[in-house]
Amino acid sequence: MSIELKTISPDTEKVNALRKRARILSYITVGYNVLEGVVSILAGWLAVSIALVGFGLDSAMESLSGGVMIWRFGHSADMSKEEELRREKKAVRLIGYTFFVFGAYVLYESMEKLLSAEAAKPSLLGIAIAIVSLIAMPALFYAKYRTGKAMNSRSLVADSKQTFACMLLSLALLIGLGLNYIWGIWWADPAVGLVVVAFLFKEGREAIKEEKLCTCCSCPTDQD
C-alpha cells in the first residue's frame, strides 16, 4: 500500500506565515486598544477631560476595526465568498455609523466646555497614556505596514495607516494635556476634543464609503 505525501510549496508556506502574522498583529491591536480605551475613559472621567474620553472612545472603535481584521484573516473556509462580503459590509457600515455617534457626542461636550469655560483637571495619568501610545503605535504601524505590503493586502495597509493616525492623535492629546498640566491652559483640552472629533468623523466617513475590506492575499498589488 502506497502512501501519498502532500508537499507544501514555499509560496504557500510564506502566505500562511503572513496570514498568521496579520492575525497576531490584529490581536495585539485589539488588546492594546481595549486596554487603552478603558484606562483613557476612566482617566477622562476622573479629570473631567473630554479629550481623554474622546481618545478612549476612538480606541474602542479601533478595537472594533481590529476585530473585523481578525475575522477577515481567520474566517471559516466553509463560508461562501458572497456571505463573507455581505457580513463584512454590514460590520464595516456599523463601525462607520458608530464613529459618527461617538463623534457627535465628543463634539457636543467639547463645544459645551469651550462655551462654558469649564476647565479639565490636570491628568498625569492621561499624559502617561499618551506617551505609552506614542511609543507603541509607531512599532505597530511599521509591522502592519510591512506585512500588508508583503501580502499585497490593501486592507492591512489601510489598517496600518489607521494606526499611524492614532499615533498623531496621541501626539495631539499629549500636547493638549501637557499645556493644561504645565501652564493651566484650560481650553487646550476641549480643543483637542475637536481634533478627536475630526478623526472620528473622518474614519466613519471612510468606513461607510469603502464598505469593504480586501481579502488577504487576493488584492491586486499596490501601485505607487
Image (cartoon, helix red, strand yellow):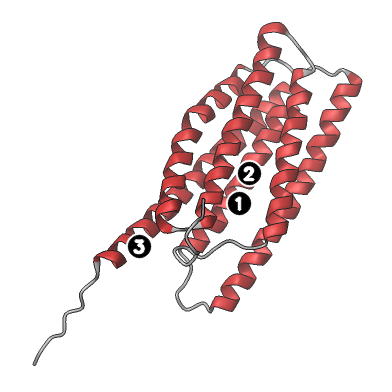
Q: What is the three-letter code of the residue carrying label 1?
A: Leu
Q: Nearer the viewer, residue 194 or 29?
A: 194
Residue 23 sits in quarter: bottom left
Measured as percent of width and height from the top left, residue 166 is found at: 59, 36
Question: Which residue lies under the disc numbered 2?
Answer: 60
Q: Residue at x 47, y 72 (%)?
A: 76
Name the residue carrying label 3: 15
Q: Residue furthest bottom?
A: 1
Q: Earlier in the sequence, mark 2 or mark 3?
A: 3
Report, in whole angstroms, how far the alpha carbon at label 2 lies from the one at label 3. Answer: 30 Å
Q: Nearer the viewer, mark 2 or mark 3?
A: 3
Label 2–label 1 contact, CB within 8 A:
yes
Instruction: Kindly check if marks 3 and 1 are in contact, taking CB atoms under 8 A apart as contact.
Output: no
x, y (%) of residue 61? 64, 46
Secondary structure beneath label 3: helix
Image x and y of residue 198, in percent: 75, 37
Q: Is residue 119 rendered to the left or right of residue 10? A: right
Q: Amino acid at mark 2?
A: Ala
Q: Residue 164, percent across and down?
A: 55, 38
Badge 1 density bin: few <14, some 14–19, many ≥20, Cα 10 Å: many
- Label 2 SS: helix
Assign the N terminus to one quadrant of the image: bottom left
| Residue on which disc 1 sits | 64
Q: Quadrant of residue 11?
A: bottom left
The amino acid beneath tag 3 is Val
From the viewer's side, name the closer residue of 150 and 39. 150
Q: Quick one: label 3, few (<14), some, or many (20+) residues within 10 Å?
A: some
